[in-house]
Image (spheres, rainbow, N blue to C red):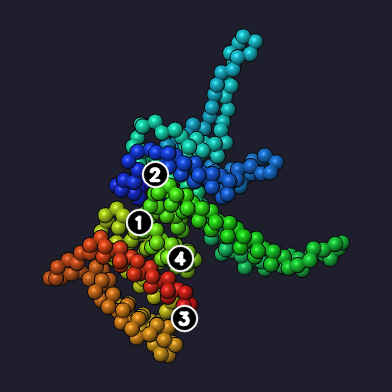
Amino acid sequence: MLTDIFAYRYLENPIWDNFRENARRLLVQGFRIVAEQLFPYYDTNGKEKPEAKAIWDGLNKKLAMELGLEDLSSPTYGYYTEWNGNKHWTRGSWPKVKVCENFVLATYDGSMSADQFVKERLSFIELAFRQQEEILSTLNASLDRRVQESELAAKMKPNRGMRLPGNPGDGLRTWNQTQNEMFRASCNELNERFRRSRVKLHYHNGFIQISEDEAVTREIEQPFWNLVGDPMWQSVDHDMKEAIDLRDSGGRDPALFAAKALESAIKIISCAKCWTRGNEKGAANYIDNLRAKANGEFINSWERESLVEFFSKVRNPLGHGAGSQPIPELSAPQTDWVIEFCMIWIKNLIRRL
């Protein structure tokens, strides 16, 4: 199962052998993206924003719970000052944004491995990005309702005085689109920071995962994650993340989960197009739904043969008992091929819709 934070998912997969300048720089850059782009804590007047306060408090609690801490860093401070020859103790409470900052940007003191130190702090950045994913998902799901409500309110409002031109619903749609575009830009920046720090990591749809090949990431993985970020493809997104986690941690049957992601995508398309009859017994039947002439031949014959062959030779032996036959085992390059094959097919099928 997917673990909630990056540090635990890659606990047995060393990435940093020591704490170098590129790791320090990456943590600073990642935290600044969160603090300046995702969740600015203060408004333009320097006042604490209630919604931001709640988010930072939640991030502190979530990661502290996973790491077995009360808070990520000390929630209070205290120091002596001298006045008229007397020492006075001054104390106070840090805002939660400072508690989180003190944790992420802490000086590495060697009390734990550099690998664990960096991973725990990247886990904060991952949780913050995931939080924004969830906020945007809620906004996107409620957009139509909010547009209807705003347009109805505008119609019901008495026509007195000067009225601003334009449809309030259009303004709301533009604002919503801007929020999504700003977040995508933040995701792209974080991934660029990973690249520049020469660490083979990639953020997508709430998770930081290992990505070995820059060309594959650019041409296959990133377009794939962008497409399956829609709630419609939730099961596809989950199974592919599971496949990558199992591959990176040396877990069992990562190719099976990649194949499940592809099978789910085929089933979702069949249902979305109203081609599913209800008597399908396996992946081959759903593939036939996509191939059927009555359905406009969503895929052609050679594509059908390629998919059926894949499920017959890879998916089915892994997903069912081997019986008296040898248990199928894939090499590391074969596993990578299966994951990339499934990503390419899913990406291509979704783009045909």
User: Which numbered circle lies on residue 277?
Assistant: none
Q: Is residue 295 above or below residue 148?
A: below
Viewer-nearest of labels 1 and 4? 1
Q: Gap in Å between the C-alphas at discs 2 and 4?
A: 26 Å
Which residue position is annotated with label 1?
Answer: 212
Viewer-nearest of labels 3 and 4? 4
Which residue position is annotated with label 4?
Answer: 223
* Kind of residue at badge 2: Lys
> Is residue 297 shown to the viewer in this render?
yes
From the top left corner, tell me how far across and down residue 86 is, in percent. 60, 10
Q: Secondary structure at mark 2?
A: helix
Q: Secondary structure at mark 1?
A: loop
Q: Gap in Å between the C-alphas at discs 1 and 4?
A: 16 Å
From the top left corner, tell me how far across and down residue 97 is, in percent. 55, 39
Residue drawn at x 23%, y 64% is 330
> Is tag 2's residue or tag 4's residue first in the polypeptide sequence?
2
